[in-house]
């Protein structure tokens, strides 16, 4: 059993605390939150011990679960790594690429495991759809949310789009050749709405949109490849597969035959893969335990987190360049 402690007892921190209470392999020692009122309230609500300082908590555990605002990720993670504690850190891994490089060095020196909380990897809809994803040609993702001040300490690219950037880099294994992007700051100092077009060396093109000023929530990705059209609804936990074949089988009730201009026929077959309901946050924390005890690479490694962050900053740079051109 590994002793684990949580840094940060805000909205997401409390979710992590509740999940960890359900994982028998972890011994949930306690948490630290710098807001005394929050710390006292959560302790009264959950019965979990509130530690007086960040160092006191880190000293008491084997694993540190960091669920603080992004701007404090590096400070908290570096403290834990210097004391050779395993670190689970919420997305984005840290606030800047320079911090990411420094964190990577600390992790290598400590010789411990680090996992990044890109939770959509554990979304049951993505898990169900992933076996059908081959060589995507075009990917379109929309991640829209109603306004919540909780994430406005960073641009929407780091707050929301990072989820889709992680999925993108998971399914497209090719160098990026070009990025174009635009963004608008509406209510916060940094872009609240951003669209990015990412082109890969293998010909894949991705078009990603993220907004935290929408009237409704949407977390949907559409994947087009030569033999299939795949949709993944991360919000409603659904996946749909439309497969295209040159062989026509009229006995399949979930299929349709289309005739092309040259007279040839193709069949479109519809399939909804079975979704196995899971708690994605609980599952990712369980997977981290497994990586530690079995000495394997975490599902979302520190390198994965760094690659997503660096791509996010390339998008932010493209947004700035586009804005500069408009101002001229």
Image (spheres, grey):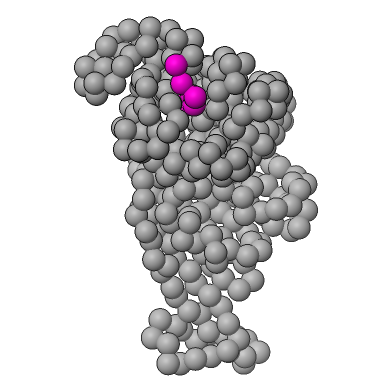
Q: Quadrant of the C terminus?
A: top right
Q: Which segment did they paint magenta?
A: 60-65
Q: Quadrant of the N terminus?
A: top left
| Residue that sits furthest to the front in the current view | 1
Magenta stretch encompasses residue 125: no
| Residue that sits furthest to the left in the current view | 45
Q: Nearer the viewer, residue 218 or 119?
A: 119
Magenta stretch encompasses residue 61: yes
- Residue at 76 percent across and 48 percent down: it is 175
Relative to 234, residue 317 above or below: above
- Residue at 38 percent across and 61 percent down: it is 275
Q: Nearer the viewer, residue 1 or 164?
A: 1
x then y, percent, for residue 65: 46, 26
328 with respect to 218 (left or right): right
Is there any visible trace of residue 151 in the rendered image? no
x then y, percent, for residue 166: 58, 43
x then y, percent, for residue 305: 61, 35
Relative to 136, residue 48 above or below: above
- Residue at 60 percent across and 43 percent down: it is 296
Relative to 247, residue 65 above or below: above
Is there any visible trace of residue 116 in the rendered image? yes
Q: Nearer the viewer, residue 206 or 260?
A: 206
- Residue at 50 percent across and 86 percent down: it is 257
325 with respect to 120 (left or right): right
């Amino acid at each position: 059993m590994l002793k684990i402690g949580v840094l940060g007892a805000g909205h997401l921190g409390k979710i992590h605390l509740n999940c960890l209470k359900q994982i028998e392999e972890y011994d949930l020692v306690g948490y630290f939150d710098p807001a005394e009122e929050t710390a006292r309230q959560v302790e009264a609500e959950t019965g979990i011990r509130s530690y007086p300082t960040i160092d006191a908590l880190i000293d008491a555990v084997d694993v540190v679960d960091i669920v603080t605002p992004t701007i404090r990720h590096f400070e908290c993670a570096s403290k834990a790594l210097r004391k050779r504690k395993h670190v689970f850190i919420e997305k984005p891994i840290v606030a800047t690429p320079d911090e990411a490089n420094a964190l990577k060095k600390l992790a290598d020196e400590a010789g411990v495991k680090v996992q990044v909380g890109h939770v959509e990897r554990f979304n049951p809809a993505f898990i169900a759809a992933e076996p059908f994803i081959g060589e995507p040609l075009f990917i379109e993702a929309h991640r829209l949310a109603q306004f919540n001040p909780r994430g406005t300490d960073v641009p929407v690219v780091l707050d929301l789009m990072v989820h889709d950037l992680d999925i993108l880099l998971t399914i497209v294994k090719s160098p990026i050749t070009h990025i174009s992007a635009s963004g608008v700051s509406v209510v916060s100092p940094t872009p609240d709405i951003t669209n990015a077009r990412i082109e890969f060396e293998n010909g894949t093109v991705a078009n990603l949109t993220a907004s935290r000023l929408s009237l409704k929530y949407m977390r949907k990705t559409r994947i087009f490849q030569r033999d299939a059209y795949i949709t993944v609804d991360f919000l409603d936990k659904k996946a749909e597969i439309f497969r295209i074949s040159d062989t026509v089988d009229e006995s399949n009730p979930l299929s349709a035959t289309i005739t092309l201009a040259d007279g040839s026929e193709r069949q479109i077959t519809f399939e909804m893969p079975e979704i196995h309901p899971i708690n994605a946050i609980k599952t990712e924390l369980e997977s981290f335990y497994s990586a530690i005890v079995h000495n394997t690479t975490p599902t979302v490694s520190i390198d994965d987190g760094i690659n997503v962050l660096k791509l996010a900053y390339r998008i932010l740079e493209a947004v700035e360049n586009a804005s500069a051109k408009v101002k001229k």
